[in-house]
Amino acid sequence: MPGINLIDKQPFYVQIRNMIKQKIESGEWKEGDIIPSEKELSETYGVSRVTIRAAIAQLVKEQYLTRRAGYGTTVLKTQSSMSNFTLIQSFTNEMNEMGLPSKTIDATLKLIPADKILASIFKIQEGDMLYNLQRVRGTLIPILYSDTYMIPVIELPNTKEFLYGSLYQYLSSKQVFFNLFEEVVSAVIAPKSVKNLLHIYDESPQLKRKRFAYDASNKLIEYTETYYNAAHYEYRTRLFYRRK
C-alpha cells in the first residue's frame, strides 16, 4: 500500500485524503462500507490520528464519507454513483457490449478563446480560454464526431495517449469528477464539414447530442456536441435506481 510521500509538497492530510478518495472512486471501498478506524488508518499510513482526522473531515465535507456517533465512518458515495438514476455509457463500452471494436480515428486538442456563444454557455467572459478537443471515433468506419469544450481546471496533455484515450478516465486519474450530466438529443441535418468526416452523402437527419457536465458545486466544466452517423449507430443509455 502506498504511503506518505515525503518529497511531495502537499500536506500529509491532503495526501491521505487523496489515497482514501482513490479507494472510494475505484470501488475498493463501496457505498455503505464502514472504513477502518482512525487508529487503524494511522498505523496503516504511518501518520498521526490528528492527520487522519483532518483527511476524513475533508472527505466528509466533500460528501464522500459520513460519520455517525457510536457507529463509525461510512462511505457515502462512489464516483460511479454520481447520479441517482442515470449511468451514461461511454462509446467504447457501448461498442464492446455489441461485440464491435472501437477506436479514435482522429483527434486534435487546442486552447481557444471563448466566443460569445461559448461564453454564454459557460457563464464566462468572452476571450477566456477553453480547451477544445475534437475527435472522430468509430469501429472500422467513422461513426461519431465530438466537439468538446472544457474549462481548464487542469492542464490537458497534447499527447497521443491522451488524445486517443478516454477523456473521463484521464480526468478521474487527476481527481477531476463530475456530479451531474445533462443531455439534449435531437435529429438534425449535420453540417457539411461533419458529413465529410462521417462519410455521410445525403441530407438525411443525423443524431446530435449536447452534453453538459457539472462539478459538485454545479459549475459547468465541460460542454460537448456530438454528431452520430444514424445509419450505423443507435443511442443507448442505461437507467439504474440506487437505494439510499
Image (spheres, rainbow, N blue to C red):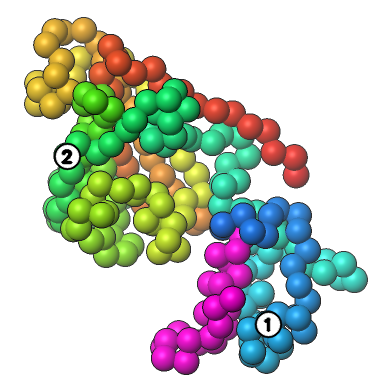
Residue 218: tell me if it is visible: no
| Depth check, front residue: 80 or 142 | 142
- Does dot 1 land on a helix, a strand or a loop? helix
For the residue marked with disc 2, what is the amino acid? Asp
| Residue 77 % position (x, y) | 65, 54
Residue for point 28% across, 27% down: 139
Residue for point 67% across, 60% down: 29
Residue for point 11% across, 11% down: 201
Q: Is residue 96 left or right of residue 225?
A: right
Say above or below: 75 vs 140.
below
Q: Is residue 236 left or right of residue 189?
A: right
The image quadrant of residue 153 is bottom left
Residue 56 shown in magenta? no
Residue 161: tell me if it is visible: yes
Range shown magenta: 1-24
| Residue 124 % position (x, y) | 27, 54
Pick whichever of labels 2 and 1 is earlier in the sequence.
Answer: 1
Residue 19 shown in magenta? yes
- Does dot 2 land on a helix, a strand or a loop? strand
Mark 2 touching mark 1, by CB under 8 A? Answer: no
Residue beneath label 1, please?
Answer: 44
For the residue marked with disc 1, what is the amino acid? Thr
| Depth check, front residue: 159 or 38 | 159
Residue for point 44% across, 34% down: 93
Residue beneath label 2, please?
Answer: 106
Q: Is residue 146 left or right of residue 242?
A: left
Say above or below: 50 vs 102.
below
